[in-house]
Image: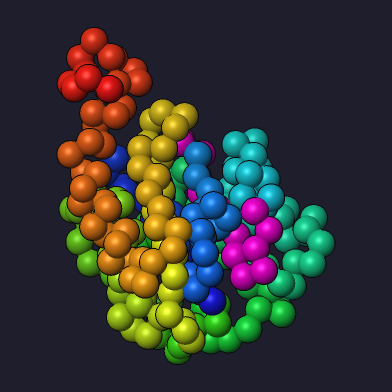
Amino acid sequence: MTFSLIGRCARTGQIGCAVSTSNISVGSRVPFARARIGAVLTQNRTDPRLGPRGLDLLASGCSADEALAALVASTPHIGWRQLAVMDAGGRTAAYTGALVKPHLGMIHGRDCVAIGNILANDRVVPAVAEGFAADASAPLAARLIRGLAAGLAAGGEHGPVRSAAVTVVAEEIFPLVDLRVDAAEQPIAALAALWEEYVPWVDEFVIRAVDPDRAQGVS
């Protein structure tokens, strides 16, 4: 009941994730990213512990393939899990357990990996990757959200999606973008609108943290 992707901007080195599902508050459980390290998605019968573990493996020097292999080998109940990993170099890996229900898919594109389970049809995951790739000049968060929108337009899940999230990491320890719609009738559209409202503040919030003397505004 979830479709998601990890994407990388080759120009800036930013890495991010976007996800949507028919359950509440997906952004708190599925996407994990760490600046200059990589990103992990953990979904289906979701185990959020796998996100930080995967990032720690990447930070230790593992490639995406090596980190994923270690997660699969060391995780109980792995048959229920669906995972994707991207390392800082843009290499990707994905896994779907034997107990994950169709329609499901995994696809590796240029600077992205998309996965999904319990979907309306087998076109959804390819559409997510195609939506991400449609405009490489756009900000990474916008590309990730467009991937979700394309997946929804291709059929989405068996039922209506309810929550969506996007996160992007750049240079700092905190996310450059971390936006969530925890419960809504049209969460992907709401996430796109939230991103448009957030765009003017992206750089300003970083400046407030690292060089507050240059910051604008009063809070």
151 or 198: nearer the viewer: 198
Q: Quadrant of the C terminus?
A: top left
Question: Percent from the top left, x then y, of residue 6?
Answer: 44, 57
Kindly indicate the quadrant of the structure image that contains residue 46.
bottom right
Kindly indicate the quadrant of the structure image that contains residue 129.
bottom left
- Whether residue 5 is visible to the viewer of this picture, yes or no, is no
Is residue 101 toward the left or the right of residue 143 in the image?
Answer: right
Question: Percent from the top left, x then y, of residue 106?
Answer: 51, 73
Question: Percent from the top left, x then y, of residue 147?
Answer: 33, 67
Q: Residue at x 69, y 50 (%)?
A: 49
For the rendered model, the colour scheme is: rainbow
155 or 12: nearer the viewer: 155
**For the view shown, which residue lies furthest in the bottom direction?**
121
Q: Looking at the picture, does residue 133 appear above or below residue 156?
A: above
Q: Residue at x 47, y 84 (%)?
A: 159
Question: Percent from the top left, x then y, of residue 113?
Answer: 45, 63
Q: Looking at the picture, does residue 188 appear above or below residue 67?
A: below
Kindly indicate the quadrant of the structure image that contains residue 215.
top left
**For the view shown, which residue lies furthest in the top direction?**
213
In reply to whether residue 165 is colored magenta, the answer given is no
Q: Which residues are magenta?
A: 35-48
Q: Residue at x 60, y 60 (%)?
A: 42
Is residue 216 toward the left or the right of residue 61 in the image?
Answer: left
- Whether residue 179 is visible to the viewer of this picture, yes or no, is yes
Is residue 104 toward the left or the right of residue 179 in the image?
Answer: right
Q: Quadrant of the N terminus?
A: bottom right
Q: Residue at x 23, y 36 (%)?
A: 201
Total label count? 0
